[in-house]
Amino acid sequence: MKRRELLKSALGVSVGLAGMSALTPLYASDGMVIKAEPMYDVPVTKVTESSYYILAKDPEPTPENHAFFNNPGFVVTSEGVVVIDTGSSVQIGEMILRQIKTVTDKPVVMVINTHYHGDHFLGNHAFVEAYPDVPIYAHPAAIENIKSDKGAFWLGFMQRNSNNGITGTVITPPNKTFKGGEKFKIGDKTFKIHQYGTVHTESDLIIEVVEDRVVFMGDTAMRRVANMADGSFVGTIEAMKKAQALNANHYIVGHGVHDDVQVCKDMQVFCETIYNNVAMYYDEGLSDFEMKPKILAEPFMQEVASQWPGYDQTIGVFISLAVAEVEKNMF
């Protein structure tokens, strides 16, 4: 069965009304999956003459933003467009395709998913509908997670948080792999794929566009306190050092406005401030509850990190996760 036919089949994994079940498909009388209304257009942010992204202003998925809260990116080459992350739904993927058309008429020739969190791959559906043979790349661990329970989890999560705004989205796993270390050319652009171990997840890909001196960071770096449950503080610290050594002019992050290398420096200091202090206070016998006010009093936390979305709600979870990582690293 071809991918286009699979997407239209009742065997495809799709979403229905969250009030019934987040994963219950709804069908019209002709047997087709009912789709939620289209995603509104979000303008393109130009970084260089060929590297772009679509800035999501909100830090979390909501009904109002249709679960659009990450930054899909794309690179226009002389042979076609390379898309980096596809958003949280088929509706967002379709919006990305519309926005690409405001920049170029060239076809999409490659899609890369930086990891397996739903805001980075659920829009694949739209790209396969538009380009049935398009190769979609991800790390092998990302593909494994998407094909297992993580794909269904993220589908339901986005559906619930958007109040059914992604209805009609079909889980569409990547079909090609990058393991890290690949270097290739598409038209006039050279791409390097970097994989630095477990950072935000065990499957993160960082994409460097050599001629543009642009790096697409995925969620390995951001000025946002969101999700470290699948990641590593130590891994992030080391990855940020390596990312800085790429000497790019522009770092496009998965959430928030792009920046120069400072965004990597900030992420490194943030993780060091949490992890190193947790390790010290753990040796002193403090609980995570007792550590929290001491860590929050650190200058970087007060002056920088406290301004990031999600800080007040999530920083305690980050400290608890750091405690667990410190304990794991003792053995």
Image (cartoon, rainbow, N blue to C red):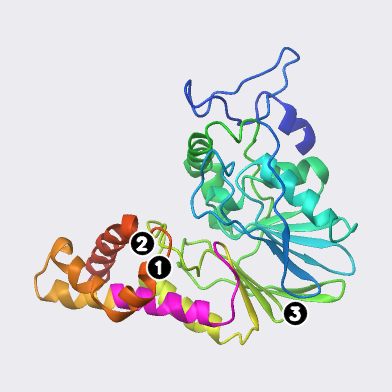
Dominant SS in magenta: helix
Is the C-beta separation of discs 3 and 2 under 8 Å? no
Q: Earlier in the sequence, mark 1 or mark 3?
A: 3
Q: Is residue 235 left or right of residue 327?
A: right
**Distance in Å between CA atoms under marks 1 and 2:** 7 Å
Residue beneath the point at 80% across and 49% down: 98
Q: Which residue is mark 1?
A: 307
- Three-letter residue code for mark 2: Tyr
**Distance in Å between CA atoms under marks 1 and 3:** 30 Å
- Three-letter residue code for mark 1: Gln
Instruction: Confirm whether residue 2 shows in the render.
Output: no
Residue 28 location, quadrant? top right
Q: Which residue is mark 2?
A: 311
Mark 1, mark 2: which one is toward the viewer?
Answer: 1
Q: Which residue is mark 3?
A: 212
Instruction: Confirm whether residue 295 shows in the render.
Output: yes
- Around disc 2, counting alpha carbons within 10 Å, would you say few (fewer than 14), some (14 to 19), or many (20 or more)? some
In the image, the segment drawn in magenta is 255-274
Quadrant position of the C terminus in the picture: bottom left
- Three-letter residue code for mark 3: Asp
